[in-house]
Each structure stands twice: as C-alpha cells, then as structure tokens.
Image (cartoon, grey):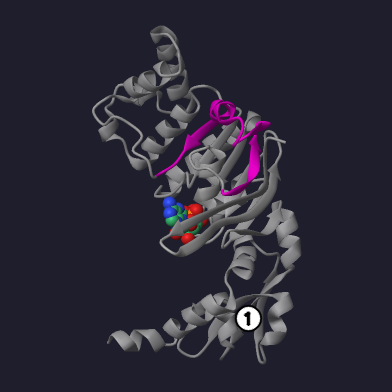
Amino acid sequence: MSIKTDNLSKTFRIRDKEIKAVDSVTFEIDKNTIGALVGPNGAGKTTLIKMLSTLIIPTSGDAYVNGYSIIKDEKKVKESIGLVTVSERLFYYRLTALENLVFFASLQNMSLSEARKRAKELLELVGLGEWANIPYMKFSTGMQRKLALARALITDPPVLLLDEPTLGLDPLSARMFRDLVRRIGRDKTILLTSHYMKDIEELTEKIILLKKGKVIAEGNKDDLKNYLGRVVEVEVNDYPLTLGKYVIETSTNYYVLRVPEKELDELRDYKIIKEEEPSLEDVYIFLVGDVEDSAKLESVRRGGWWRRWE
Ligand SMILES: Nc1ncnc2c1ncn2[C@@H]1O[C@H](COP(=O)(O)OP(=O)(O)OP(=O)(O)O)[C@@H](O)[C@H]1O
C-alpha cells in the first residue's frame, strides 16, 4: 500500500465555530496506481493533501505514505513525496526554467553538475527542453504547471500529490498534461484532486468521493458506474424540484433530463430519448448534489432568486 489513511480527521476552529474539514477518512491507494480525490468545493480535498504532505497536522487519526506515518515519520514522508499545488508561488520570475530547477535541485544536497544534469533531464521529460533558457515570467499557465511537475520530480519520489493539476489549463494543454501524468504514473503512486471529470475518467484507477469531509463513495470507475446503473435521457413538460440537478437542456416548452434509471419513477409523464451506460459525471451528480442544493438551483432556474435582484 503506498498511501493509506486511517480515520484521518482535521477540525479547524474559527472563534467558537468548528469546521470538520476532514472527518474520519479511511482509504488506500495501491503502489503505482493513480488515485483521485473528488468532491464539491469545501469537501476537504486540499486539507487531505496538505495532511499527507505533512504541511498541516491532523486533529486525530493517522496516514501512511510509502509506509511512513505522517505524524511519527514526517521527514521520511517528506522525502517520499513530490507535491504540486496551484496555490503557492513556486518559482523565481526572472530566472529561466533551467536556473529555477537547478536552484531547487541544489537545495536537495546535489552538486551543481548533478543538479544541472537532473534539471535538464526533467525539462526534457515534461516537454520543456526547448524552453530551458526562457525566464519563468514568460511561461504560460500550462508551461508553469509542467515546470511545477518537473520540480516535484527532482528527487524522483515514489509518491506524487497533485492538487488540481489541470486547473486553468486550456483543453489541449490539459490533455497534454494528462498524458504526461499518465506516463509518469507508470512507476509512481499519484494522488490528485480535480473537478474535471475528464481527468478522473482518463487518468485514475481509484476514486475517493468526498463530501463535507467524509468519504461517500470509493472504488474504480466501473464500481462507481455499476453502483449507479443505467441513465436515461427523457423529455418532460415538468418535473419535481428534487430532480433539478438532472436537467441538461431547457427549452420554452420542454426540458431534457438525464436521470438514473432508478430515479425514473419520480417522473410522471416522460418521453425517452435515449438510454445508456452512465459517465462518471452522472455518478458524481447523483451522489454529490443533494436535494437541498438541487432545490436552490431550481429556484434560480425558475426565476425565484433572479426576481429578488431585479
Ligand atoms: N486554514 C483553515 N482554517 C479554517 N478553515 C479551513 C482552513 N482550510 C480549510 N478550511 C475549511 O475546511 C473545509 C475544507 O476545505 P478544503 O480547502 O480542504 O476543501 P476542498 O475540497 O479542497 O475545496 P475546493 O474544491 O474548493 O478546493 C472548508 O469548509 C474550508 O473552509
């Protein structure tokens, strides 16, 4: 097992309010597997990644990365991981890509010649070989992300933690980045977070779905899809508020809903357009969107909240 959490929890206290950001989370990611933490904003994904990378200390529970406890073996955990996040300011703007990597490599007890060799290898690996001597400030978001990945690979760690690696990337850059992650993932364990179902669908072998700090579903793509069953696209004239999350098309006199077959009996009159296997997005919508959120969305769609602001 390369990543294992055991009732891992983190509670933040702001004045007299407690936020259970991560609430007794237990899961495992096998060696050389790509896993994903998926869930809505505030589900606890980043907090989990930060605990696994020893940046924040759990309130209770423990986790093991490459066999080391994040509480007892912090140093070993740090040595085992490469971390890529979007939130930190990673690089020196005026230095070139090569100079930046050489700088970070030399912090890892490498000689200057070793650091230069490693930096050049990594720039080739991530497809930035031709950009080695260009200052970082000229880099696009996609190139910045690749350089961040190269930096995380300097020590060739067995585990990579990637927090929203494709955030802000255009579709082509995102696709190229996924390809890179897939190649690197052949001999590393990767845990990533993402809001893009395409990342999850194409890259990951194990999915952990989080909501309000808790694991609400876990498994590979097929497990999750089988759990949902088939989905049906139907045309209706009206539908109950609770099914608002399934609307995929709105016209002046009809709606198209994409509904799990097992929820079809919530509808009275409908015309079936097509029936198919679910996508991961279908699974996500089914599990994550609850009645409360769906009702809010509905009241906006039907003009309730707009009117207030007119
Ligand atoms: N340092 C902090 N102090 C107080 N509350 C925090 C802190 N960090 C996170 N939280 C809260 O913990 C919860 C989980 O946040 P977290 O950033 O882990 O979610 P997330 O799943 O990564 O969300 P997103 O998809 O928006 O990045 C949220 O309610 C957030 O407001």
Given residues 152 and 3, the one toward you in this image is 3
Q: Is residue 303 above or below residue 227?
A: below
Who is closer to the viewer here, 301 or 290? Answer: 290
Q: Residue at x 72, y 76 (%)?
A: 261
**Dot 1 corresponds to which residue?**
234
Q: What residue is rendered at 59% in x and 32% in y?
A: 159
Horizontal and vertical percent position of residue 257: 59, 78
Location of residue 67 by image quarter: top right
All told, the count of numbered labels is 1
Q: Is residue 136 left or right of residue 157?
A: left
Res. 41 in view: no
Q: Is residue 220 visible?
A: yes
* Residue found farthest to the front: 16
Q: Is residue 281 above or below residue 76?
A: below
- Secondary element under disc 1, as helix, strand or loop, is strand
From the top left corner, tell me how far across and down residue 143 is, in percent: 38, 36
Amino acid identity at mark 1 = Val
The answer to whether residue 290 is magenta is no
Query: Residue 60 or 258: which is nearer the viewer?
Result: 60
Q: Is residue 166 left or right of residue 309?
A: right
Decide: is 239 above or below 110: below
Q: Quadrant of residue 279?
A: bottom right
Q: Quadrant of the N terminus?
A: top right
- Are there few (<14), some (14-19), or many (20+) residues within 10 Å of tag 1? many
Residue shown at the point (45%, 88%) measured from the top left: 252
Q: Is mark 1 within 8 Å of ligand 1?
A: no
* Residue 61 inside the magenta-drawn segment: yes
The stretch in magenta equals: 59-86
Percent x, y of residue 112: 39, 9
Q: Quadrant of residue 245?
A: bottom right
Q: Where does the C terminus fall, quadrant-wise?
A: bottom left
Give 162 or 199, whichever is nearer the viewer.
Answer: 162
